[in-house]
Amino acid sequence: MPLAQSMANVRNRWRGRFSRSKASSDLEHIHAVGARGEKLAAKFLRKNGYKFLYRNFLPTKYGRGGQIDLVRRDGETLVFVEVKSLRSDN
């Protein structure tokens, strides 16, 4: 194998280890869409009189059972909110 080709192979292997893959980029985009949806939902609830209690609440000590996106209070009622965000490519 020529030296230049060998060096190119090594460079490509290292580049692949440290560059962001399309999958991680897509995952970051999904998280950004979800965070934006949660922010919009929190703003809507605040404007409608719901009092803030928690965001991204883990109900158990060890995180089993999932996460609750928003926990709010409406008078004497606890309100648990699961936010689902849709994205549009438009």
Image: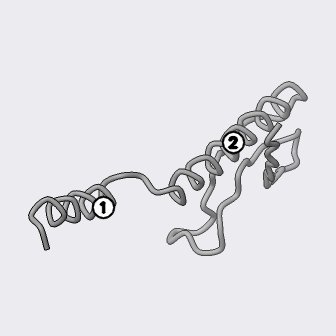
Q: Nearer the viewer, residue 84 or 10?
A: 10
Q: Residue shown at 79%/55% (left/top)?
A: 82
Q: Position of residue 80 (x, y in %)?
A: 80, 54
Can you say whether 51 is above or below 55 in the image?
Answer: above
Q: Which residue is mark 1?
A: 17
Q: Quadrant of the N terminus?
A: bottom left
Query: Which residue occupies the extreme front position in the image?
Result: 2
Q: Which residue is mark 2?
A: 53
**In the image, 13: left or right of 55?**
left
The amino acid marked with disc number 1 is: Arg
Can you say whether 3 is above or below 39 in the image?
Answer: below
Can you say whether 40 is above or below 12 in the image?
Answer: above
Dots 2, 1 in contact, CB < 8 A: no
Q: Helix, strand, or loop for circle 1?
A: helix
Q: Quadrant of the C terminus?
A: top right
Q: Residue shown at 62%/43% (left/top)?
A: 32
Q: Which mark is residue 51?
A: none
Q: Nearer the viewer, residue 33 or 58?
A: 33
Instruction: Looking at the image, tell me whether mark 2 or mark 1 is earlier in sequence order.
Output: 1
Q: Position of residue 69 (x, y in %)?
A: 70, 52
Q: Residue shown at 52%/56% (left/top)?
A: 22
Q: Position of residue 60 (x, y in %)?
A: 58, 69
